[in-house]
């Protein structure tokens, strides 16, 4: 019997473990828990560069296009696959929202229970909705992310539960795949790579990925790594932990990053920089990206572009160089913030005359 097999089926994306298997600590015995994460768009920021008169080859790596809407899926496919291989019954994490959404989704897929601990009232509602819908046990802590992380560390030292925060090395392993993809998409490693920094796992992961591609001889150079923290939550910039971090970018509202050393190594080995951007700069970049490039990312994600714009004004870059900004999460997770900052008046009942006025204004 002949079965249909359209020719493109063999080139469809299988998720990061299948696509980059030889770079990961997996064997044929590892059950692959995947939502076909990765393969996210790398878009040239043609409108932004023109509008702001920026002489750079600027690209946006939109990791909000992952299945749960953030880069965390890259790490979670590996963390949950290894947890399943070890017959884990439950996983736990502390989170500013995205880790909890990804952990809950991949745990559901694996048939493993998930417990997530989040700072009460300080995560975007879409992320909370995700954890609830995926059937996680959601605990809200009257404290910040750093306190939540300390709590889950204590839990795993007392119970046979797998920690899936980025101190779990499989998370970093999976997240390095974004660096591979960028090289594969560009055909070379960018000169500069800019990204938001919170708990600092992702910058650690990217740097590992770029270095591995260079060691394998797939690229000849590694990029200069640029990390950006929110000014009210910038322990790496200040050189010491911050007890009460504050920023509108709740995803990176972190005062004592677990991968502190990894971030500093990425900065120093690459000759890069970790700098702070204000909430105003973050929100301005957030709006610029959405209005000019059609990409809706979450506020924390926009810290990467905010940082690049800040350094550009200081003449940090050589003209015409390739700069990639990672946009880590999807804007739909946090619609409240978007509506608040958009400054648009929404007409509940538009009259014909009102429509006419708008059309006359914009044409
Ligand atoms: N961008 C977004 C959208 C995030 O959710 C995070 C971290 C970061 C950037 C920073 O990445 O921590 O590896 O430096 N979110 C974590 C969470 C802390 O719990 O979802 P990082």
Image (spheres, rainbow, N blue to C red):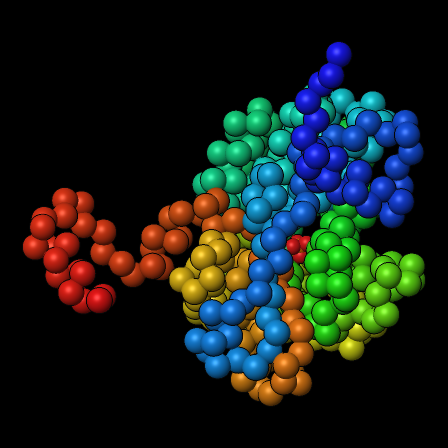
User: In the image, is residue 82 above or below residue 95?
Assistant: above
User: In the image, is residue 89 above or below residue 281?
Assistant: above
Q: Position of residue 203 (x, y in %)?
A: 72, 60
Q: Position of residue 292 (x, y in %)?
A: 43, 65
User: In the image, is residue 363 above or below residue 118?
Assistant: below
Q: Position of residue 352 (x, y in %)?
A: 9, 50
Residue 232 left/right relative to 190 = left
Question: Can you say which quadrant of the picture contains the N terminus?
Answer: top right
Residue in the image at 79% along x and 43% along y = 19
* Residue 232 in sight from this viewpoint: no
In terms of depth relative to the viewer, which is nearer, 186 or 86? 186
User: In the image, is residue 137 above or below residue 195?
Assistant: above
* Residue 222 in sight from this viewpoint: yes
Residue in the image at 58% along x and 86% along y = 314
Residue that extends furthest to the bottom in the rendered view of this protein:
315
Residue in the image at 53% along x and 62% along y = 302
Question: Can you say which quadrant of the picture contains the C terminus?
Answer: bottom left
Q: Position of residue 7 (x, y in %)?
A: 70, 34
In terms of depth relative to the viewer, which is nearer, 332 or 159? 332
Residue in the image at 47% along x and 69% along y = 47
């Amino acid at each position: 019997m002949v079965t249909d097999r359209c020719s493109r089926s063999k080139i469809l994306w299988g998720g990061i473990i299948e696509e980059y298997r030889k770079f990961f600590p997996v064997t044929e015995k590892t059950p692959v828990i995947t939502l076909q994460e990765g393969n996210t768009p790398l878009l040239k920021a043609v409108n932004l560069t023109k509008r702001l008169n920026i002489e750079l080859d600027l690209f946006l790596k939109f990791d909000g296009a992952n299945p749960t809407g953030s880069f965390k899926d890259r790490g979670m496919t590996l963390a949950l696959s290894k947890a399943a291989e070890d017959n884990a019954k439950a996983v736990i994490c502390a989170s500013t929202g995205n880790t909890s959404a990804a952990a809950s989704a991949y745990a559901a897929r694996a048939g493993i229970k998930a417990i997530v601990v989040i700072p009460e009232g300080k995560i975007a509602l879409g992320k909370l909705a995700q954890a609830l819908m995926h059937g996680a046990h959601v605990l809200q802590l009257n404290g910040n992310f750093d306190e939540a992380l300390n709590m889950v560390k204590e839990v795993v030292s007392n119970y046979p539960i797998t920690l899936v925060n980025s101190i779990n090395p499989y998370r970093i392993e999976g997240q390095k795949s974004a660096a591979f993809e960028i090289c594969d998409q560009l055909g070379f490693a960018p000169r500069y790579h800019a990204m938001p920094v919170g708990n600092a796992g992702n910058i650690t992961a990217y740097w590992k990925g770029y270095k591995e591609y260079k060691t394998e001889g797939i690229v000849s150079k590694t990029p200069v790594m640029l990390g950006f923290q929110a000014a009210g939550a910038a322990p790496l910039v200040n050189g010491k932990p911050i007890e009460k971090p504050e920023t509108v970018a709740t995803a990176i509202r972190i005062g004592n990053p677990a991968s502190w050393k990894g971030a500093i190594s990425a900065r120093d080995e690459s000759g890069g920089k970790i700098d702070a951007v204000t909430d105003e700069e973050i929100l301005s970049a957030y709006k610029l990206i959405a209005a000019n490039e059609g990409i809706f990312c979450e506020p924390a994600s926009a810290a990467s572009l905010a940082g690049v714009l800040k350094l550009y004004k200081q003449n940090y870059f050589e003209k015409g160089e390739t700069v990639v900004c990672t946009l880590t999460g999807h804007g739909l997770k946090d619609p409240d913030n978007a509506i608040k900052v958009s400054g648009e008046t929404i007409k509940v009942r538009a009259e014909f005359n009102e429509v006419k006025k708008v059309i006359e204004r914009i044409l």
